Image (cartoon, grey):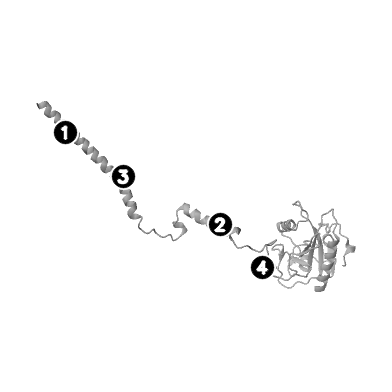
Amino acid sequence: MKSTKQTSYIFFWIFLFFIVIVFIFGVSSLIYFFIPKIYSAIHSKEKPASITSLAEIPKPLENSVEEIKTEEKSPENNAPEEKKDQPVSAENKTIPAASAITKQNLISWGFEVPTAKRTIDTVIVHSSYCATGKDVYSLACILKEYKDYTVSAHYIIGRDGVIYQLVNEKNIAYHAGLGQTPDKRNRINNFSIGIELMNTKTDKFTAEQYDSLNKLLKEIKSRYTIKYVLGHDQVSPTRKTDPWNFDWTKISK
């Protein structure tokens, strides 16, 4: 009888222990699963704090803002602009064309603005071609080479006779460099106008180029008292050989 009673006590304590374990497990589950949800529900109703600077933005969001800024600056998102062959500086833009026979293609390098009005009495004739591209007479390619070397001329005449004005005549174009005129003056850029004609060392100038050069020279002479019309090789014989294959009999000096 006593043994039976002891057995009952043992089963009672085992059952009680089992109940306590189940209770603890249940309470733990409630805490684990439901308390975070209740906390989130309460705090989701609060107004989020405002962001006052990019420094307060988490890193992923900060990158997104930067990407948006970059996209807004892209050409595809801007209003279409007028297409220009070359950029134009403030000192070399919004000027009237030198004549009706020229086309303006003003550039922003290879010249300087003089401190006083220039006295122009010389014209220097040059020749150029593109040595780095497939089309040796590409205006864009020739101008790129000018830009790379920071040189220029006031005008360049294409193979078809079209005259492009690159630099305002009032400005000093870097076209002649070291040299000397027949009257022993140097610093030729200061008192001259430079005219380039597209041609290679083995090709010949076209009839259209000679015709346009004569028209341009006539107009230049109507604006200034021109003393000399010279080739680059004539003012700098030890350094230059252009204008290559030029027939001086075809122009009126």
190 relative to 137, above or below: below
Secondary structure category for the residue under label 1? helix
What is the spatial separation of the Cα atoms under label 3 and label 2, in whole angstroms? Answer: 46 Å
Q: Nearer the viewer, mark 4 or mark 1?
A: 1
Tag 4: Cα neighbours inside 10 Å, few (<14), some, or many (≥20)? few
Q: Which residue is mark 1?
A: 12
Which sits in the foreground, 226 or 58? 58
Give the number of marks: 4
Locate the C terminus and report the quarter of the image it occupies: bottom right
Which residue is tagged 4?
90
Identify the residue under disc 2.
Answer: 71
> What separation in Å lies between label 1 and label 2 (alpha carbons)?
75 Å
The residue singled out by tag 3 in the image is 32
Q: Give the quarter of the image for residue 188.
A: bottom right
Q: Tell me the distance, in whole angstroms, between the alpha carbons under discs 2 and 4.
A: 28 Å
Q: Which mark lies nearer to you, 4 or 3? A: 3
Residue at 21 percent across and 38 percent down: it is 20
Of labels 3 and 2, earlier in sequence is 3
1 or 2: mark nearer the eye = 1
Chain-order first, disc 4 or disc 3? 3
Question: Of discs 2 and 4, which sits in the foreground?
Answer: 2
Q: In the image shown, does 242 or 61 lie closer to the viewer?
A: 61
Q: Nearer the viewer, residue 226 or 70?
A: 70
- In x, y percent, where is residue 14? 19, 33
Q: Amino acid at mark 3?
A: Tyr
Q: What secondary structure is marked by label 4?
A: helix
